[in-house]
Image (cartoon, rainbow, N blue to C red):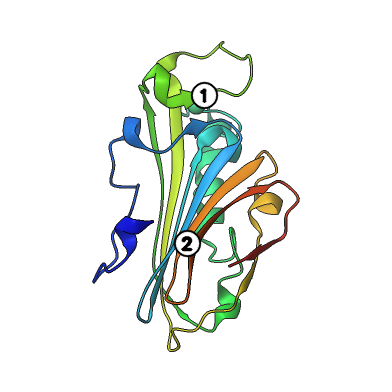
Amino acid sequence: MKLMAGMGWLLSAFLLMPAHAQPGHTHGVAQLMLLQDAGTLQLEFVSPSINIVGFEQEPRTTDERDAVDDALTTLKDPDSILSLTSLGCLIGDVQASMTGPIAIDGDSHDHGHDDHAHQETEHSAFSLVIRLDCESEQLPTEFIIHAFDTFPLLETIETQWSLAQTQGAQRLPAGITRLRI
Ligand SMILES: [Zn+2]
């Protein structure tokens, strides 16, 4: 988290990286990052598509396309991952997208299970970036987690935060409903 300290403006910490450099494409695991710069709070969420829609190949059937559209609509709800609307901040820019399928180096991802039926080139991910404008820099010390309810296939969220009052990281297993920062 050293990198974040002292940054005068917010960068998307890992969404801008090439896919193979993204931290751990591990099925079941998603990454969540909270970044704060003065009154601006940014949430970033990245997950293998399999946690979100149950598949990672290019959507081909109507059902698959609908599943992707529904997931993107769901992600754009500011409370899909964390309770953001309760913060009293203005919800600004919201970007949700599905990236891939893309080739991922064998070393940089882990299936976490024995299903090798799909091709190495068929890994894809969903990403979400939400920017909020907050009047107060003081954020609550506890956030309500909605992601496991929203996406029942999700097993773990690797959380990192770099906020005005604190920095840290925590690995949240499914069933956890609160993130204490
Ligand atoms: Zn995958």
**Crowding at label 1, few (<14), some or many (≥20) Cα neighbours within 10 Å?**
some
Give the residue type that dot 1 points to. Asp
Most foreground residue, 110 or 47 = 110
Residue lying farthest top?
A: 117
Most foreground residue, 98 or 29 = 29
Q: Position of residue 21 (x, y in %)?
A: 33, 34
Of callouts 1 and 2, the N-terminal one: 1
- Frontmost of labels 1 and 2 is 2
Name above or below for residue 37 compared with residue 78.
below
Q: Is residue 124 left or right of residue 151?
A: left
Residue identifier under label 2: 161
Write the residue at 63% across / 43% down. Answer: 156
Q: Is residue 85 left or right of residue 149?
A: left
Residue identifier under label 1: 110
Residue lying farthest front?
A: 2
Q: Is residue 143 left or right of residue 95?
A: right
Q: Position of residue 136 (x, y in %)?
A: 45, 88
Q: Is residue 95 left or right of residue 67?
A: left
Q: Position of residue 26 (x, y in %)?
A: 53, 31
Write the residue at 50% across / 36% down. Answer: 48
Give the residue type that dot 2 points to. Trp
Q: Position of residue 74 (x, y in %)?
A: 56, 55
Answer with the quarter of the image where residue 180 lies: bottom right
